[in-house]
Every structure is written in C-alpha cells, then in structure tokens.
Image (spheres, rainbow, N blue to C red):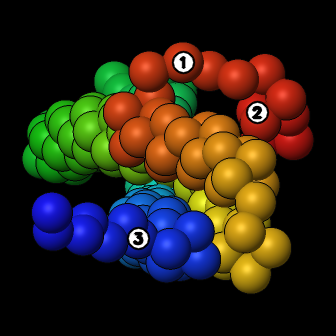
Amino acid sequence: MAEIELPKLEELEQAKTRTFERRVALTTSIFAMLLAIASLGGNNATKEMLLSQQLSSDQWAFYQSKSIKEHQTRTQRLQLELELAERGDKMPHEARKKAEALLGQVAEEEKRYQSEKQEIEKEAKALEHERDLNRTKNPYFEFAEVLLQIAIVMASISILADTPVIFHFSLVLASLGGFLALNGYLLLVRIPFLQAGH
C-alpha cells in the first residue's frame, strides 16, 4: 500500500498566512487607488474653489466700475435735465437741440451700464455658486483621505500582527473613506458636521 504524505501543520499555517497576506496586500492596493482618487478630487475642488473666488472677485470689481460709470452718467443726466428745466425756453434753439441730444445719449449710456451691470452680477453670482459648491465638496475629500490613509496603515499592521480583526477594521475605514470620496464628487448626501464653517 502506498503511503500518503499529509502536509505538515506548519506548512498549512504558512499557506494560510500567505493567503491572508496576499489578500491584505491586494486590498491595500485598492485602498491606495481610492486614496489617489480622493486626493485628486480634493486638489481639484480646492483649485476650482480658489479660481472661482478669484474670478468672482474680478467680476465684482468690474461691476463696481460699471456702477461708478452709471452713477456718473446719472449725475450728468440729472444736471442736463435740470439745466433744460431751468433754461429750456431761454436757451437758443441750437443749444437746446444739442443739450436734448446729449441728454438722450447720456440716458442711453446710463441704461447700457445698468444692463451690463446685471450681466456682470449674474456671472459673479454663478462663480460664487461654483466656489460654494467646491467649498462644500472639499471636506468630504479631506476626511476620505484621512480615513483611507488610516485604513492603509491598519491593513499593514494586520499583516505584521497577523490579526484579521485589524484588517476588518481597515475595511470599515476604507469603506467610509470610499463613500466620502464618492460623496465629494457627487454630493449624494450632506453630512452636517462636515458643512460647519464652510
């Protein structure tokens, strides 16, 4: 009868440990990939927030400039109207005609500045909305990065300590981090404590 050689207990333990180590290493690679995605989202949200803020500030400065010009033309229009009201009949016909033409031009210019201001205001508010949206997204990415970094460390510790419980804890942390990263991109839910101060 042929002898059947059974694997030794030590070999079975080593194979089991290697399988656990491979699983943890593969999972840690996925954690690292999620961390890179969260980091990219956070960097983009920060850049977009700062760019939108700068562009919005520029638009508001342009709006202020148009407001000043509108105020100047309104003042000019009111002065012309006052002059025509005071001296209208006493003015030579040619001078009155020129003053009325100038009044029409100034009134049109005032309307133009008012219209341009409205367009500029709409653009500035749209940029502010973009800034606020990215400001809302940013904390989700920040917390996702922290949780994913901790998950990577915990997974590494689980290999060294050969403790599946620590690995399962890293899975929980990574799941939360992955959800927060996804939420940073899509804003599926608003988490109140992440919105405070933003």
Secondary structure at numbered mark 1? loop
- Residue at position x 31%, y 72% in the image: 5
From this view, report whether residue 175 is shown above or below residue 57.
Answer: above
Q: Is residue 54 left or right of residue 3?
A: right
Give the residue furthest to the front: 1
| 1 or 3: mark nearer the eye | 3
Q: Label 1: which residue?
A: 189
Q: Are marks 1 and 3 in contact (CB under 8 Å)?
A: no
Q: Label 3: which residue?
A: 7
Amino acid of disc 1:
Val
Location of residue 48 (image quadrant): bottom left
- Residue at position x 66%, y 45% in the image: 168
Image coordinates of residue 153 in percent, x first then y, are 72, 74
> Of callouts 2 and 1, which one flags the residue occurring earlier in the amino acid sequence?
1
Amino acid of disc 2:
Gln
The residue lying toward the viewer, choosing from 197 and 118, is 197
Image coordinates of residue 187 in percent, x first then y, are 45, 29
Secondary structure at numbered mark 3? loop
From this view, report whether residue 192 is shown above or below residue 177.
Answer: above
| Res. 198 visible in picture | yes
| 2 or 1: mark nearer the eye | 1
Image coordinates of residue 193 in percent, x first then y, are 85, 29
Q: Label 2: which residue?
A: 195
Amino acid of disc 3:
Pro
Q: Residues within 10 Å of mark 1 (few under 14, many from 20)?
A: few
